[in-house]
Amino acid sequence: MPEHFPDTFRIPLPDDFHVHLRQDEPLRVYVHDLASSFGRAIVMPNTTPPIRNAADLRRYRDEIIDAAAGYPWFTPLMTFKIAESHSAGQVRQLAAAGAYAGKLYPQGATTNSEDGVPDIRAAWPVFEAMQDSDLVLCIHGEDPTSFVLDREDAFLPVLEEMVRDFPRLRIVLEHITTSRAVELIRSLPDTVAATITVHHLLLTLDDVVGGFLNPHVFCKPIMKRPEDRAALAEAALSASPKFFFGSDSAPHPVGAKENACGCAGVYTAPVAMPLLIDFFERHGSIAGLREFCCERGRRFYRLPESDYEVSYSRKPWTVPERYGVVVPFRAGSTVVWTGSRPEPVQGG
Amino acid sequence: MPEHFPDTFRIPLPDDFHVHLRQDEPLRVYVHDLASSFGRAIVMPNTTPPIRNAADLRRYRDEIIDAAAGYPWFTPLMTFKIAESHSAGQVRQLAAAGAYAGKLYPQGATTNSEDGVPDIRAAWPVFEAMQDSDLVLCIHGEDPTSFVLDREDAFLPVLEEMVRDFPRLRIVLEHITTSRAVELIRSLPDTVAATITVHHLLLTLDDVVGGFLNPHVFCKPIMKRPEDRAALAEAALSASPKFFFGSDSAPHPVGAKENACGCAGVYTAPVAMPLLIDFFERHGSIAGLREFCCERGRRFYRLPESDYEVSYSRKPWTVPERYGVVVPFRAGSTVVWTGSRPEPVQGG
């Protein structure tokens, strides 16, 4: 029973549990787009070079905090890129430096994963150390040796092994795309959750290759079938605590998308919240929106309620064709909802 | 049992039973690339404007023959683009003008099909007239209202209806891509055949979206799963008279491929024969190659044996990065086989 939303409503400032921010000058732009809508964000470590150790992590966090100076409500939640060579001591140092999670990239699974983990079982001791340090394990869950549409499902047995061998390790299967992944996540213990992106909620493979080829919605894992999208939507709209929002927003300059070697990634940060509100108005409720974007993720990551809130109003705007050199998701189209500047929770 | 081919061998000059040649100046380039390797070619009518009537067909044929002046062995086999408004008289005029086939494009199925047939059953009287005139019906067999990976299989029941209602109509399901299409074609009477392209024999969806996005192998119908490719390979290598070569070679300027609205189509004309020879050497025989490229199609179309033959030699060459403004299939890679200039059959 969808609910017609009031023309203005307030929610706690949402968090984004999976985002790419890049580095240096571009970072300053991307942080602006992200921090305009979100309070906290799990920042992916597959920068060039990657975030591998405590010193890198501190330096990258400082860089982000500096870039986000105009956004006092914004806190980056740092991660590191798992290597099978990480020692238990290094993992403890990363935890002490404030890491929230380590990210597992199977080698070759996506952008900047050439230095990912080639043999996941060789990283078992790293997962053990992460479990001991109470770090979250974030996973790009694809087996890159499988056919492109089967890669996520082919990874699921590995996830099951991890859950069996590390019963206290909190695990997030990132940006899930298939009905089988949804089913498995539901069936696993509460130590296991999944993020869902806005583009996987809204699109299927039809939107990439069904008409003209559209590089701007090409991503990894690639969108799947309508039945898969329906399963993701059901999960996001459900009362399960296991599914929450992570945008996987990934800025690629237009030249890296529109050429013979198109990079994977969709830049959704500027439009994610308006589109999610629209999705929940059509299919769910404000309570459901709040659970998906503001509550379930922070509970899983054991974060306090946000000190900020934001007001969204039915004020349509046209998505610019470019944010700097990046073509955003839904460029040129009209989105309905406009967010206010976040404000501290009154009486909080 | 693959057969190691001799370093030089002769075959009848192959034919291409599905090709796009465009018009005007570009046509002169594309005819060169095609006529260098093929004797006859079924030329698609989805030009701008399309080939709809006898006068258009004659004019387009003259244009092609003029452009192919240096290739005395080359004969274009003309087609027209079916509209549900075609009268029986118009169909007879097209046959009298020398049309070999009419091409059915479901509206919206591929490049330049906005003016295709919206309701296929409304074209039943056209098929009736084509049957009466002994014209071949070539079909882009996709239901564009289905999910992209299901479109070909969703069309198959329509094909079955056509075969039931027009038992004497020769039908070619063009550029098939799925194992179900292969199965159905096998099971239907000998009035029904299918073409297979070289890119669908060699690639799967992995090659389009499995790594970086590759617009140069994006086509309609899109490549499917490894099992589907295996079924196509088995069909091409089999003794069935129902499967023969049609390249669907389609030149798009690089700017129309590498941008936010990538056009569908792969330019294979310059490399199709070397790649097919390589395929048959790895999986089949020279006899099989000859059946697939030189015999089955002409028998289905009731054409005589070629008056020309060509010699292929194991002389590797590097595929240019561009043919004019078009990026060819396998640009920059090495292919093994080089064809001679076609020569009249001796004692023929």
Image (spheres, coloured by chain):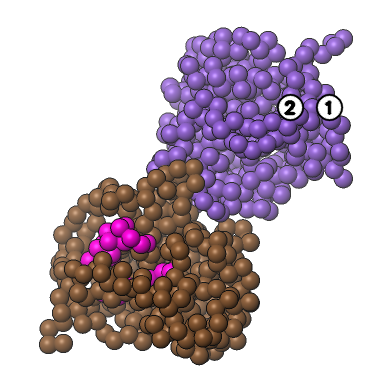
Chain colours: A brown, B purple
Say what amino acid the circle numbered 1 marks. Thr
Which mark is on residue B69?
none
Helix, strand or loop at label 2? It is: strand
Residue count near mark 2 (Cα–Cα under 10 Å), binned few <14, some 14–19, many ≥20: some
Q: Which residue is mark 1?
A: B8
- Locate residue B177 relative to residue A76 in the image: left or right: right
Mark 1 and mark 2: Cα distance apart in space: 9 Å
Residue stretch in magenta: A22-45
Q: Is residue B132 above or below residue B288?
A: above
Subunit under mark 2: B
Q: Which residue is mark 2?
A: B338
Label 1 in the same subunit as label 2: yes
Q: Mark yes or no: residue B244 visible.
A: no
Task: Name the spot of residue B13 as percent of width and height, x first.
Answer: 75, 21
Q: Nearer the viewer, residue B281 or B331?
A: B331
Task: Name the spot of residue B269 as percent of width and height, x first.
Answer: 62, 28
Q: Is residue A55 above or below residue A134?
A: above
Task: Name the spot of residue A127 as percent of width and height, x first.
Answer: 55, 82
Q: Quadrant of the C terminus of chain B?
A: top right
The quarter of the picture where residue B236 lies is top right
Subunit under mark 1: B
